[in-house]
Image (spheres, rainbow, N blue to C red):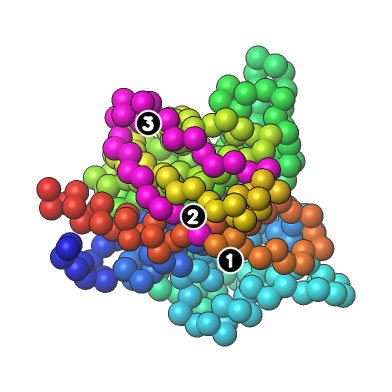
Amino acid sequence: MNEPFAKEDVKIAVIGGGTGSFTLLSSIKHYTKQVAAIVNMVDDGGSTGVLRDELGVLPPGDVRQCLVALSDSPKVRDLFDYRFEEGTFNGHSFGNILLTALEKVTGSFTEAVATASEILRVNGTVIPATLDDVRLKMEWPDASLILKGERVIDANYFSHDPRRAHLSLMPNPVANPMAIAAINQADLIVVAPGDLYTSLGPLLVIDGIGDALRQTKALKLYVANLVTKDGQTNGFTVSDHAREIERFAGGEFLDYVLYNEQTPDAKIAARYKKEKAYLTEIDKSALGRAHYKSVAGQFLGKMSQAHKDALPVTRSLIRHDAAAVVKLIMDIYHNDRTS
């Protein structure tokens, strides 16, 4: 039995955006109040995309999800997640609209996030990876093919190997100094599960992020995706995912990779198949040769329920069992630091 660790002792930085970060943060907050959620800023689909295009604001969607995950106010959490189902605001979440209004009032997205954090009684800090207004670009130089925009790339069925593509942001952004500081000060850094090319990659390719990850003394873990994404990562193994994570960051930095070894029952497997999602293959031989340590776990969580969204957006309903993942993360951290 491991010794208990004090809730306030461990400084944890979670890197990602959207559902993957939301899932882990909802459980991590029970272990420590010193959480920094570093969020990607390229979302341009759904409610977020409409607000960006019509009002010229920074994308609120992924930031909202992280704020809600770290909130200690259930009623306000529900309010921020409330999505209008009719009228002018049909398809928009209240939290996205509020963050947009706060940015307009204060003239600063940083202040907007800080004010929303107060309203939500957030335990931790939510940090945009950059404060520049950027769009995602994915380019295959050998094929003279360029895709522009997170929404376009997210919905694309890649005709060429994405591992040969160059991922970048337009214009080239400056990393948020708060994000670099959070990485430098962390005891533990977790790269959350998420879409490789529209959630994790767009954050890791920002100049300075990769260098900070290699230089920090923090323990660094990546929680591999449960399933592959149809048309993009078909056939990708656990080590393929980890290799792409490090490619985006410009070099090796991971200490551990956590992956799922649990098999779904027939009913859940059928729902996975309906989403054209297949369990990420465990390539034990390649993992055994990797510079990082790989650790298996029973990570399959309950599938999420679909909700009405009048604004087109791609969402998977497949989720990690956050409690199981985070318990293993904290066990690894505790054992590594005491070994």
Place of residue 123 in the rendered image (x, y in percent of width and height, measured from the top left): 40, 73
* Residue under numbered circle 3: 284
Nearest to the observer: residue 161 or residue 63: 161
Quarter holding the N terminus? bottom left
Residue found farthest to the top = 142
Per the image, label 3 sits on a secondary structure element best described as helix
Amino acid type at circle 3 is Lys
* Residue under numbered circle 2: 300
Residue found 49% across the figure and 55% down from its top? 300
Amino acid type at circle 2 is Leu
* Picture disc at residue 243: none
What range is drawn magenta here?
A: 275-301
Q: In this view, does 301 lie to the left or right of 98?
A: left
Residue found 20% across the figure and 67% down from its top? 5
Which quarter of the picture shows residue 95? bottom right
Which quarter of the picture shows residue 229? top right
Q: Does the magenta stretch include residue 302?
A: no
Considering only order in the chain, which callout, 1 or 3, is on the residue closer to the N terminus?
1
Alpha-carbon neighbours of circle 1 within 10 Å: few (<14), some, or many (≥20)? many
Per the image, label 1 sits on a secondary structure element best described as helix
Does the residue at mark 3 contact the one at mark 2 (Cβ under 8 Å)? no
Q: In this view, does 92 lie to the left or right of 269?
A: right
Place of residue 302 in the rendered image (x, y in percent of width and height, measured from the top left): 55, 62
Disc 3/disc 1 C-alpha distance (Å): 37 Å
Considering only vertical position in the picture, is 333 above or below 150? below
Alpha-carbon neighbours of circle 2 within 10 Å: few (<14), some, or many (≥20)? many
Considering only order in the chain, which callout, 2 or 1, is on the residue closer to the N terminus?
1
Which is closer to the viewer, label 1 or label 2?
Answer: 2
* Residue under numbered circle 1: 64
Place of residue 260 in the rendered image (x, y in percent of width and height, measured from the top left): 43, 46
